[in-house]
Amino acid sequence: MTTPTPLPSANQPLTPANAEPSRGSALARWLPIVAWLPAYQRGWLKDDVVAGLGLTALLVPQGMAYAQLAGLPPITGLYTSIMCLVAYAVFGPSRVLVLGPDSSLGPMIAASILPLVASGGDPGKAVLLASVQSVLVGVFMVGAGVAKLGFVADLLSKPTMVGYMNGLALTILVGQVRKLAGFSIEADGLLAEIAATWDKIVAGKTNLWALGIGLGALVLIKLLQKVLPKLPAVLVAVIAGILASTWLDLPAKGVKVVGELPQGFPPLTLPIVSVGEIGLLVAGALGITLVALADTISTATAYARRTGQPVDGNQEMVGIGAANVLAGFFQGFAVSTSGSRTAVAFKAGARSQITGLVGAVAILVLLVVAPNLLAALPIPVLGAIVVVAAFSLAEIPATRRLWSQRRMEFWLSIAATLAVAVLGVLPGIGVAVALSILNVFRRSWWPYQAVLGREKGTNPGYFDLAENPRAGSMPGLTIFRFDAPIFFANARTFADQVLRLADADPRPELDPRRRRTDLRHRHHRRRHARGVGRRSADPRGAAGLRRAQRAGAGQDRRLRDAPRAGAIPLLHDAQQGRQGLPGAVRHALARRGAARPCGCPSTHPCGCPSTHPCGCPSTHPCGCLGTHAGGCLGTHAGTRLRLRCERQARALTWPT
């Protein structure tokens, strides 16, 4: 009787034993569903269905709200959610990531399409432009994935990304005030929008019913998220808004509602625009691609650490690109991964992309069976949902950490925030990329520099003296850390800092006993230089020297038989330098000529004819008659006059 294979725990990816057999094929490489669907087990279906239905409660209201954030009809958010979930289930490599309309992309889409749509123009024109841009984003994503350009996401550094998200959150908050207050404005840019909103409020244009229902939904969502985090707070707010709209007859009081939604499947369209409109759409698509790529890689990496599944950044781009292309052909707009929706699916126990397919089918059933179920939903409730998303986008804790850790990174973040606020969303992403690249040059040109020291006590290691006040420098020793490779731009900075530290730190005092030893050695060197006591420097004496020379002469026959190319090289024909050499060496010199003025087979570059102060019979300052690194034929430092072996003699080479 065989034991059945146990099911993996919740959120655990398919194991290599049952998910990787077909991964080697080219089809499974580009269509991951071919690899994981045959290995899918029936026991996982219950968890995926429950997680998918719970995800639908978040997909519907957020999709509609983010569609309005992008300046599009709410129904396009539902179309987009259906198509992107289906496409990523086929092409996406991750088991838990959830795609859909994103709050960070909504302002970028609006900044691209609204200038091309006249004031109060046809919403159908806006939908067409957004669909074309979605297809462009998909083409850029797929091309980057095929070309393995996932590293492009690194163009947005963490400080500038924090600043960009803060500016984006500020832009979203200001843009949703008019929806919460129940009026509309015409303004271009954040500062102009703030001024126009303030003028409307001062003029008394605020609809108190709309403001009350919007603030009530906002408070309800935040309260439920804090008190009952497992409860779908957004869905509860949507149901409460529909009930309040029906009971209080809010449309009669001037509160805008979603209205009737089109019934049936998303329509297949071929988005085509004029050549004059394509330029701004391409610029916006590039910015959306960069932001979506950075967001996707960070989210995929975070959940890969939890599930143990490797991150395939290039295939992630292919999956998101396919989702954008499919959404663009069904009146959708650009999408990205959603951290909030992925967290909901992950906590609900999602095991595969079946969760996303269940969510797509549930939305489709809603559109076919009961499209008017959301007709009474107030627009201020959708505005409250977007405001909650804007609060989640703001990186206030990260900004505080930048202030406490690195002030320069903090000011880069503030510069990115101001660029988004003053220049707009699309120019802001360009400024953020430029600041990231300049920050790389700055950190290489003027890197962080520190003087290290030891901390008194049992804590081992070296610490930055500026950051650890308990650490102290060691007397007579300065450890300088330069946090960058040295090249032409920072070489002068490195040299200046080293010289400054050398001037600031006094020269260490030597131990008295060592100082006396150094003085004695210096005295002997001076005596040798004057020629005093040369004979006595050799402990073997003259007799020992002659015996060593006779012992070395026994190598004559083997050296004469050595090959011409492998024996001792040719030295300079200096007769004075050949005196006192063994017969074998003299024979080699006479046989091959000379190449150095000193006459000894050495590699020392000076080659000057002199007598070594130690008293050995040599004409080279180093005192050796052979190789300087060992195996010498002289008496340098008392070394016995000999040749190590014939093999070593043949291996010796000297530059001519």
Image (cartoon, rainbow, N blue to C red):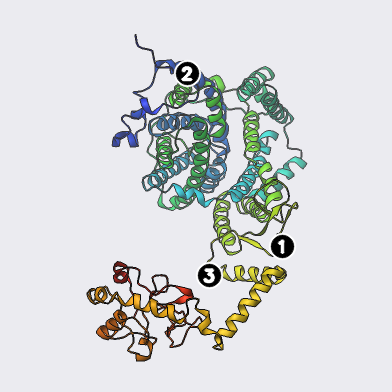
Q: Which residue is tagged 1?
A: 475
In the image, which is nearer the foreground, mark 1 or mark 2?
A: 1
Q: Which mark is residue 25?
A: none
Q: Position of residue 275 (x, y in %)?
A: 40, 52
Q: Which residue is tagged 3?
A: 488
**Kind of residue at disc 3:** Phe
Q: Relative to residue 520, is residue 228 depicted above or below?
A: above
Q: Relative to residue 268, is residue 279 depicted above or below?
A: below
How far apart are the alpha carbons under marks 1 and 3?
A: 32 Å
> Local crowd at mark 3 within 10 Å, few (<14), some, or many (≥20)?
few
Taking depth in this image into account, of 113 and 544 the one nearest to the observer is 544
Q: Which residue is tagged 2?
A: 49
Label 2 close to label 3 by CB (< 8 Å): no
How far apart are the alpha carbons under marks 2 and 3?
A: 60 Å
Left or right, 601 with reference to 79? left
Quarter of the image holding residue 330? top left
How far apart are the alpha carbons under marks 1 and 2?
A: 69 Å
- For the residue labelled by badge 3, is the local secondary structure a helix, a strand or a loop? loop
- For the residue labelled by badge 1, is the local secondary structure a helix, a strand or a loop? loop
In the image, which is nearer the foreground, mark 1 or mark 3?
A: 1
Quadrant where the image shows the N terminus:
top left
Q: Relative to residue 436, is residue 615 depicted above or below?
A: below
**Kind of residue at disc 2:** Val
Taking depth in this image into account, of 459 and 226 the one nearest to the observer is 459
Q: Position of residue 404 (x, y in %)?
A: 71, 49
Any part of residue 602 in sight: no
Quarter of the image holding residue 220? top right
Q: Position of residue 432 (x, y in %)?
A: 57, 53
Label 1 close to label 3 by CB (< 8 Å): no
**Kind of residue at disc 1:** Pro
Furthest residue in direction top, as rendered: 1
